Structure formats: C-alpha cells, structure tokens
Image (tube, rainbow, N blue to C red):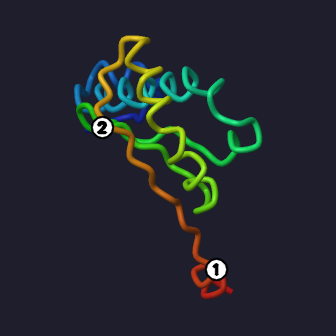
C-alpha cells in the first residue's frame, strides 16, 4: 500500500479530532479572556502575562516572574469581576510563574 502524506490545516485536523477541537476552542477562549482584562493590567506588566489553561470555572494566567505575580494577585478580584460582567464563568484565577532554568541551558553546552 502506497500512502502519501498530505499536509492539512489546523482547522481540518480539528474537524477530524474532537479532542484537538476542544483544546483549540479552550486556547482561543483563554486568549480572549486575557484580551478582555488587558485594559485592567498595568501596561508595564502586560508582556509578563500569557493566557493559560482553563479548567471549568478556573482560569490560569502564566507569568514570567514572581514580581509580576505579586502585582497581578492584587488586582485578581477586579479581573474576575470584569470577566463575569462579560459573561465568562470564572470562579477563580490561578497564577503560575513559568520558571526557566539556567541549569537546563548550561547542561546543553
């Protein structure tokens, strides 16, 4: 049997795989949430945030450092209230600091 591998778009892959479709939907929803709360976040902190996973009514924000997490923690109630006013079910926002290890890059030398 001679099978050729054909390229296909992400949308085509999502249509064929319900799990992938759901992940794509959640990812887009998470990015939309971050965009919705962006005006409430101080401009200097915006580059330190990434949209994270959604698990039911819990949304996760990924932060690049502990200082940004401390500042965002102070405005979490306002972020949650804003998201609820826009129609999202958000019981809580979890903060995760993404740690990049200097050791891992040193060990690859």
Q: Position of residue 107 (x, y in %)?
A: 60, 88
Q: Determine the secondary structure under disc 2.
A: strand
Rendered image quadrant of residue 13? top left
Left or right: residue 20 versus residue 44 is left
Nearer to us of marks 2 and 1 is 2
Look at the image and tell me in which quarter the C terminus lies: bottom right
Q: Position of residue 48 (x, y in %)?
A: 66, 48
Instruction: Name the residue: 54% across, 67% down.
Output: 99
Vertical comparison of 104 with 30: above or below: below
Residue 63's disc is: none
Instruction: Name the residue: 55% across, 54% down.
Output: 69
Viewer-proximal residue among 68 and 24: 68
Residue picked out by circle 2: 58
Vertical comparison of 68 with 66: above or below: above
Rendered image quadrant of residue 39? top right
Viewer-proximal residue among 61 and 79: 79
Left or right: residue 58 versus residue 102 is left
Badge 2 vs badge 1, beta-carbon distance below 8 Å: no
Viewer-proximal residue among 109 and 31: 31
Query: Which comes sooner in the sequence, label 2 or label 1?
Result: 2
Q: Determine the secondary structure under disc 1.
A: helix
Vertical comparison of 104 with 2: above or below: below
Q: CA distance from mark 2 to mark 1?
A: 31 Å
Using a 10 Å C-alpha cutoff, classify the residue at mark 1 as few (fewer than 14 neighbours), some (14 to 19) or many (20 or more).
few
Residue 102's disc is: 1
Rendered image quadrant of residue 85? top left
Instruction: Name the residue: 44% across, 50% down.
Output: 95
Count of marks placed on residues: 2
Using a 10 Å C-alpha cutoff, classify the residue at mark 2 as few (fewer than 14 neighbours), some (14 to 19) or many (20 or more).
few
Q: Position of residue 23 (x, y in %)?
A: 33, 32
Look at the image and tell me in which quarter the N terminus lies: top left
């Amino acid at each position: 049997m001679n099978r050729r591998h054909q390229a296909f778009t992400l949308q085509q892959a999502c249509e064929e795989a319900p799990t992938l479709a759901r992940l794509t939907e959640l990812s887009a929803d998470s990015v939309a949430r971050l965009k919705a709360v962006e005006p409430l976040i101080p401009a200097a902190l915006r580059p330190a945030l990434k949209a994270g996973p959604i698990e039911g009514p819990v949304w996760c924000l990924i932060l690049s450092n502990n200082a940004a997490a401390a500042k965002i923690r102070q405005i979490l109630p306002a972020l949650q209230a804003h998201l609820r006013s826009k129609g999202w079910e958000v019981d809580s926002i979890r903060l995760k600091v993404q740690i990049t290890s200097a050791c891992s890059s040193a060990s690859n030398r």
